[in-house]
Each structure stands twice: as C-alpha cells, then as structure tokens.
Amino acid sequence: MAVKYAGANGINSYPVLPVEGIRQQIVELFNANKSIRTSRDAAKKLVDQKFNSAEHFFLGNYGMTPFESMIKEHLYSPSGKAKGIKSGTAEATAIATSILAYTSPAPPQQLSREKVMLIVSGLIKYEESSNQVRANEVQIVKLSLQSMMKLEAPMPEQLLEVAKSGVLSNTLAAANASTNPTGWQTSGPLSDLGKYHKVNPNMTLDKVLKSKGFTKSGHDYIHSSGLYLTPYLIYNMKSIAGQGGPLGYWSNAARYRLAAMPISVSITEIHLVEVNPLTGAPYRRGKVVARVKSGASDAMATVRQSYPYVDELRPDVNPVLDPKINVNHATSGLNEKAEKWKLIGDKSSRYFVNILETNWIWADIDLQANQTWYNTFKEGRHTRNSKNHTQTQLLNFTSDDPKLRMNALTKGNPPKELNHLLYGGTSQQMKNTFPVSLSKFYLLPLGVEEALERICEDRVDNVVIAYINRKLGGGNAPAGSRYRKISNMTQVRWAQVMKELHEDMQVLLAALTSPYLLTKGPAYTLTGNSAERLGRSFSSAAKSRVMGIFQAAKWPATKPELMFEAPINDEADSQKVYGDFLKAMKTTGGIAPPELSSPELPEMKIQSTPQIIDGQESMVWQLDKGRGEPFNANISAVRSFLTYYNDGKKWYTKFTMRELLHTKNILSRTRVKGHSAEKRTAQFFTTQSAEVQPITGTNAPSNALIAGSLGVTALVGTAVLAALSRKENTDF
C-alpha cells in the first residue's frame, strides 16, 4: 500500500489543514503579512532605484548599507526608540532637508528635493510595513500558543513562527536532542511556558494551566481530554526541526505511530511510538501521550485530532514511502559499524548471528484475572530487576530446584488464566500486552567458530571425545575383547555414569543452541536460572561439568559486538533488515561476514558391553561413528528462552531466540529449515488485534503513514509456544 501525503504537492509541500477557529485568524494574519511584504518590497525597490541615481552620495554619507543606515539614523533616536515619523509631515520634510544639506560629499545635481522626499517616504513606508509584519508575527505566535494550549493540530507554518520567536526554545532543543519519545523530558517545555506566561509565586504555572483545562500529573500536565501537554509540544516542534521544510516534516511523521493500550475496562493509554519508517515496526513502546477514559477506538479518535499526521501502529503492513523520505539507518549506528567492519582483517574468520528479542507487558487488566498475581505483580513500585519473597514463590515454577518447582505447581502456579502473559498466546489474548520485537545482529569475537568445531566436529582435538575418555577410562582392552577400551566400572556404575553423560550432552546441546551463549558467553549461560538461559531446568552439577567442555574448547571470553538492531513485526520485516545488514557490511567492507553455523552434537555413539576380566566385572567400550547414546540426547528446537523481570514499575516477559531461517548446520552443511524453524519464526512475529476507523478531516490521516488498526501488537502462533514453554519450564 502506497503512502499518501496531504500536501498540495505531496511531499514537496506542507499539509493543508482546515481553516477554522483560531487557525482562521492565523491564516488571515499570514495573508495580511504576505500583502504587506509585497507592498513593502515595492517601496524598497523604488528607493533602491533612487539610490542608484546618486550612488556615490549615499555610499559616502551612509556607508555600504545606506538603506538600513538611513532608517536607523533618521527614523529612530540614539536609544533605539522609534520617532514615529509619518509621510507628508513636517518631520519627514525636515529629514529631506537635512539630507540635502550634506556636503561631504554634497548631493549631485540630479538628486532633486522631490526625489529625496520620495526616498524618505519610501523609508517610512518600509519601516511602517516592517513594524506591522512584526506585530502580526507576534500575534501569530500568541494565537499559536493559544491554539496549542487547546491541543489543536498546528500548521507547520505557524510552528515555524513559534520557533523563530524563541518562545519555545527549550522545547525545540528537546525535540532536536532525540528521536526517542521516551527520552523527552518535561522540564524544557514547562520552563518555556513558565517564562512565556510570566509565572510568579502568586500566579504559578499550575494556576495558569488549570485555567486552560490542565491538571498536574506527575512531572507533566494532563488536559481534560486526556492528552498530556509536553509530548504534544515536543513532537510538534520536532516536526519542523532538523532537516526542515516539507520533506523534513513528512520524514518526521513517517518515523512515528500512535498505539492504543487498554489499562482497564474504561481507560486507554495512547503511546507515541518511534518506528522504522520502512517497516512500521516499533523500537520500543514509546511515550504515553494520552490517558483517555474510553475504549481504544474512541481514545485513538481523540488523540488523532491533535496528531493528525501520525498514523496508527499497524503491524503486518510495510508502508511504501516516497523515495525522498529520510529513512536511512544512520541513527541505528549501522553505517558507523560497517565502516569499522571495513578495517577488520581476516574477515572470513569473523562470524555473525541474528538474535530476535520480543518482550511484552503484564498488563494490569490481564493480571486481574488472578487476584493473588494482581496484588503481587500489578503496576507500581517494584525493586528493579529483583524479586521479593512472594514474587519468588509464585515464579518458582521456573526454579532449578525440583522440590520448589513441584511446590509451585501444586499451588497452581503458574495460573492457567495468565498463561498468555507468561508464555505468549493468541492475538486476542495478547491485545493488551503490547509486544515489541527487535532483530539484533552481533559480530562474534574471533575464535567462536573454531571453538564450535572443537565441540561438534569429529577431529583429533574434539573436546567432547576427550571428556568422554576421561569420564569412562581410556585403557586398552585385552586381546579378544569386543571393544577397544576398558573401564574398571561395574555395570551398575557404568549405567550411572552413562545417565550422567546423557544429562551432560543435553546440557551441552541446550547451551550450544541458547541465544545467550552467543551474546553473553558460556559463563553466563551455564549459571543462573536454567529455564531462562537454557530453555529448561538442569542441575548445577551438570552445568558445571559442561562449563569445563567450553573451557577446553577455548570458547572466547570476549563479548560480541552489537552491529545493528531494527524493529520487526512480520516475516517481511525480518527478511528486509537481514538484507539491510548484509548489504551495508558488503558495500562498505567488500564482503559481509558469514553467519555462524547451527550447532549439532558429534555424530557418534558409545558401544559397550560387560566383560569379566581377571575375575572382575568391567566394561569394554568404544566410540563409533553414527548417532547414538549419549549423543542422541534431545532438546526441543522450539523451546523458549523466557525471562520474567520488572523495570521498577511494571513486570514483563522477554522471549529470546536465534533466527535460523538463513543458517546452515555445522556438520551436514545443509540449510536449517523445516517445521521447527518455521514455528519459531511464526511464534515471534506480531499482528494487529483490531481495527479502528481513521479520524477525518478533509486532508487528514491518510498521509504520512497508513491508517487503520488499533495499534496493539500481539504474538501470532503462540498457542504452540505456550504449550512448549509450559512443558519445558515445568518438567521435573
């Protein structure tokens, strides 16, 4: 779907808003100034013609800018105060007389008294016109502020006048400082308003704004309509800042969306969300710009009146923008990272991975389905990234301790009615949770591929084989034995060790396929909560043993470098940003880094049998090619890596995975594809949950981006994700 722009000449002109109310007065003043400037310019042109006829005289007496110098000298006092001289008066005649009295140089013969009188009249006319223009501009700013205090949609032209006046200088600075609305501070706009309204102890800003329908709300003010004041001011000043002109205006509009988030049955928050203009996917949830006492559709309709050229967040729709729209990845840092990649030597030995992250909110409106969980996790004051005693007990279904997991499950945790918050759910279930998804590209440190090969490939320095030999004993079996090696273990002990090795291989495979191994390293992945970092629970002893395997493989301790991240909300987005990354790296560096292979356990098996040697039971064994015990240990490819955390105010779920659709297996070298990869991808992407009709106005909202949906994203296909997650994370 192509984007439509509401300018008279598309992207090359500003939008044309309906002329009504205060806007009507502003337009009339603009038109008046246009007429005045035409007349004023004509007067100046006439004066310039007279100057040209006696150029030597005027340059000699008034310097290189005689027009401006004559106005300053004759129409103003030394203090800078205007004398108020009118054309045709005795004062005007006196000015002409004084000019003709100059002697160094003296006026030429062709400079008659009549010509000098015309020059003086032209100067007076010009200055009167200029003063009228300035007075009208002051009135435009005054009316614009009145309009903006009503949260009306401002015309770009009036915003330019406001910017020129300096009345909202701090607001403009805040707008220029960041594209991310969550970083917009209230202090700048409120400081500007306080100065403009000349607040004092007797007439505070609270009183001034209360008379205009605002009440204090935290560090901001909220209008009776439900809209917050400062983000409205910053966004509008941002629309004319930076690049400027109509192209800058529409590029700014293309960068943002409005998203509705119900927080109760009758209250909806509207967020201003920064998006990737090419995909329409959000970087984050943005800033709350309104809290309206109505359903999502009506709330969006209210806010769109004040943000008419910001479209609603609509996943699964990749907008078609005008080619001139500024949508490069400069703000992402990709260009700078590509330049750094250019300087790296031995590029074939450096690999990248694509990690996908989605997080969603535990909405109070959903938590209310379980009173205990609502009282424990509802929005409010929480210790950031920590859990209190009650929260820990309720979340113990993810514990590595089987007893704690069992106890939590016995008590009904997690509650079925909140499964979608914990594991994901259908689009309808997730409509209040506002998922946000990022595709992240990491350049791995040197040595990761080599370490992976030491673990997975059948080679002399395979560290897993060495580990097996140490665990089982590597002495040569007597002649005539079925297998080549002998272990002094009894059959019973052998079974115990094989069970342990099976667990070790499960942990190893879980670690190898964990996204955290690639982003944070084995030390992080093999400590902490297994359900979060490995996708299911494992014992600390097994994790410790497997840590030794990674150390033996010389897995680098250096952390990877984040090269690029971009928001996505459908498969087309994922494909596009993947291509953007490779293109940028190849264009700048000559070649793009290869993608790290998908790991597999060595294709081997242990064969063994008991044997009586010297009257003692022993085990003879050997490693052979072919998949078998314990290398047939299985870990679900679609298991979830779920983290439950809070930001000091709200609780969230984070779902992390590695994108494998473009990846090759390390042993077979075939491309990873099939049911599991497709499921993983489908579970990740988001879609809209409902539709809202666009707000109207003759030229309004079909402009900067596509209008349409409610703006609340939700995971697709997560019924499977939910089932798998519950199974993996509660298995004991």
Image: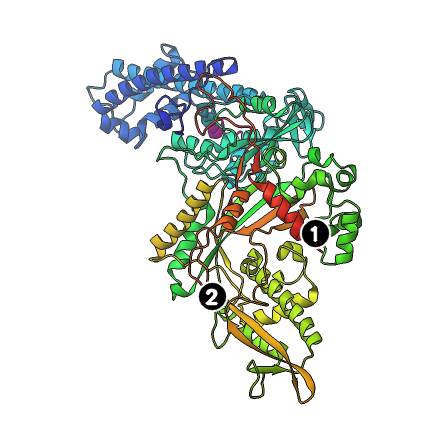
Within 10 Å of disc 2 (Cα), the crowding (few <14, some 14-19, many 20+) is many
Considering only order in the chain, which callout, 2 or 1, is on the residue closer to the N terminus? 2
Residue at left 53%, top 28%?
709
With respect to residue 624, does 700 lie above or below?
above
The kind of residue tagged 2 is Glu
Q: Which residue is mark 1?
A: 730
* Nearer to me, 120 or 583: 583
Q: Please tell me in which quadrant of the rendered image residue 218 appears.
A: top right
- The question of residue 212 being in magenta is answered with no
* Nearer to me, 506 or 413: 506
Write down the region rendered in magenta: 162-167
Within 10 Å of disc 1 (Cα), the crowding (few <14, some 14-19, many 20+) is many
Give the colour scheme of this rendering: rainbow
Point out the image quarter for the N terminus: top left
With respect to residue 231, does 624 lie above or below?
below
Whether residue 95 is visible: no
Residue at left 73%, top 34%?
369
Q: Is residue 479 left or right of residue 35?
A: right
Q: Which residue is mark 2?
A: 449
**Looking at the picture, how far across and down is residue 523, in whole percent?**
61, 65
Residue at left 68%, top 80%?
489
- Frontmost of labels 1 and 2 is 1
The kind of residue tagged 1 is Thr
> How many circles with numbers are drawn on the protein?
2
**Looking at the picture, how far across and down is residue 231, in whole percent?**
57, 32
Question: Magenta part mainly helix, strand or loop?
Answer: helix
With respect to residue 689, does 338 lie above or below?
below
Q: Please tell me in which quadrant of the rendered image residue 279 appears.
A: top left
**Looking at the picture, how far across and down is residue 222, in whole percent?**
65, 27
